[in-house]
Structures are given as C-alpha cells and as structure tokens.
Amino acid sequence: MWDEWVFSPLSSTDIDSETAGILWGLLTVYPETMSQGRFVLSGRRLWVFRRLRRIWASSRWGKRLDLSSMLNVPANFRGSVTLRIPQPIMKEVIFWGENARKKSDWQWMRGVWGNCGSLYVPKTGYYLAFRFRFYKIMELVLSILKNNQFPVGKRIVDGQYELLLRDQEKIVTLLSHYKLFDTSLKLEEKAIVRAMRDKANRLVNCDASNIRKTLEAAEWQLEIAKVFQNERILNTLPETLRELIEVRMQYPSATLTELGQMLSKPVSKSTVKYRWQKLKTMAEQLPHGI
C-alpha cells in the first residue's frame, strides 16, 4: 500500500493539497501563535518524506524553497526525520488545511493519510485507523469523514486521538478517494475470498449438524422399533406403521425423506415424521414402554 501511495502519479491540480496534507500530518502541536523563524515538523515514517521529495518541487512552496535545505535525516535513518519550515510557508499550509474541510479535499486527506493512517486486515474484520498527535487535525479529518457518511468511531489511545473505520465497503471507498486503486482492489478480492470461505464453512457446519440430527433421530426410532419387537406386537400394527419400522431397521442411517421414498407408497418427510411420532406415543403407552 505504501509503495502505491509514494509512487502514485502526480497531478498538478492536486499537488498543493497533498503537500499541505503531508505537512499537517507531521505537526506535533497546533501552531496557533508561531514565533519568528522556522517551525519544526517531525515524523518517523520514511515513506512520507520520499513522497514529499517527489512532489515538493512541483508545489507552490517548492518554487520558493528547496526541500533539502529544510530536511534533517538522522544517521542510519534511526529516529525522527525533521523539517524546519519557515513561518510564512507554514501559515499558508495551516490555512490550506483549515479550508480542506469546507470542500472535502480528498487530496489533502491523502497527504494526512501518509503519516497518520494505517490499514489492518486481521483474521476477522477490517480496520482503517488514523492517529493524531493533536486535536485540531483530528477534528478536521473527522468532520470531512462524517460529512461524507463514513461511520467512524473516536477514542484516545496511548495519549493520541484515534479515528477508526470498520466497514469494509467504506474502507474501499475511502482508499479509492486516496487514489489507492490497487490496494482497494486487493482488499475487495480478500473480502470476496473471505465471504466464499465463510459460506463454505457454514455449509460444512450445516451438513455436519444435519448428519448429527439424522443419526440421533434414527437412534430413537430404532429404539421404538425394538420396543414393538420385544412386545411381540409388531404384526398387530397398521401396515403403514409396520412397513415404516421394517424399512428403518433395514436402513438405519437413512433420512426421513429417504425413508418416505422407500415405502411401497412413497410419502413426504412430514408424513414420515408424523407416523414416527404416532409410534412413539403408542410405545410409551405399552407396559415396558420407552
């Protein structure tokens, strides 16, 4: 997913929004009053800075300032990468983000996703999460999602604000808004495979349950048949009931439907069930009943 996010084609009309979104995602506090000089942003996701390097030069701010002059990468890529953004540029970025809510700017959201988003596909369920270090950006993202009917939950985890989306179809839609089409397709494929697997498991469980019920029914029906044999009154039963007992003893594992079709005059499952219930009642009334 992150390779697709980093190397997605560039669109000249969207670059400024995405760049602003990336910088917002790197904010640790909301700069309500910024001091003179440079504002420090930081992050530990190296792919965010690879993407920023790809699009910075084409953005409105890249034409005014070289990215490498602001970037500080720690030795051996361990720790946080920092950006020292001049105050005038940062003010423009902040203004851009505050207006993203008004127009549901998905490219701005795509930039934020790079540093704050995660996608999880555990054994069951689907989870798309955002984690933010300060309240303002969480509020902006939550507003855009809710305005576009995305059912997100909100909570605080490890001192950070988290937004969580669990609906698989909505997750696919949101990834499509970010132009992560390959990831969206793979997630849909996984959902289809899961659905087919779950259906197969249900069918297997259903078959196993039906087999168990058939065997249990056959067991008590054989007990009834033995009662009539022991009482030596099998031949006194009506022909329909006597034949039913004889067929059951001959085919102990047959289903009620199969029993009905084996009779000299085939009958339905419900009729076979009724006749067995009648035999059970008769057996219970015998001196040595069941």
Image: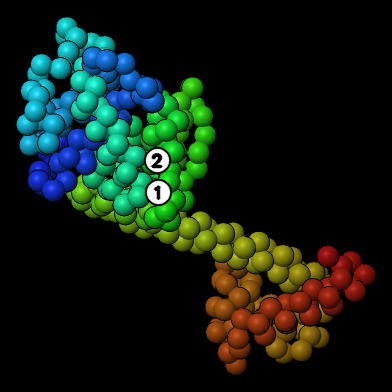
Residue 207 percent coordinates (x, y): 50, 62
**Which residue is the extreme one toward the top?**
75
Q: Which residue is mark 2?
A: 140
Quadrant in the picture for the N terminus? top left
Check disc 1 and give the amino acid type.
Leu
Does residue 71 sit above or below 101 in this rendering?
above
Residue at the spot 76% in from the left edge and 77% down from the top edge? 277
Which of the two discs, 2 and 1, labels the residue nearer the N terminus? 2
SS class, disc 2:
helix
Relative to residue 196, is residue 273 drawn left or right? right
Of 28 and 274, the residue lying toward us: 28
Residue 287: which disc?
none
Does the residue at mark 2 contact the one at mark 1 (Cβ under 8 Å)?
A: no
User: Could you say where residue 208 lies in the image, as x and y percent from the top left?
Assistant: 52, 58
* Image x and y of residue 179, in percent: 21, 49
- Residue to which mark 1 is pinned: 145
Q: Is residue 122 left or right of residue 113?
A: right
User: In this orientation, which residue lies closer to the viewer: 222 or 11?
Assistant: 11
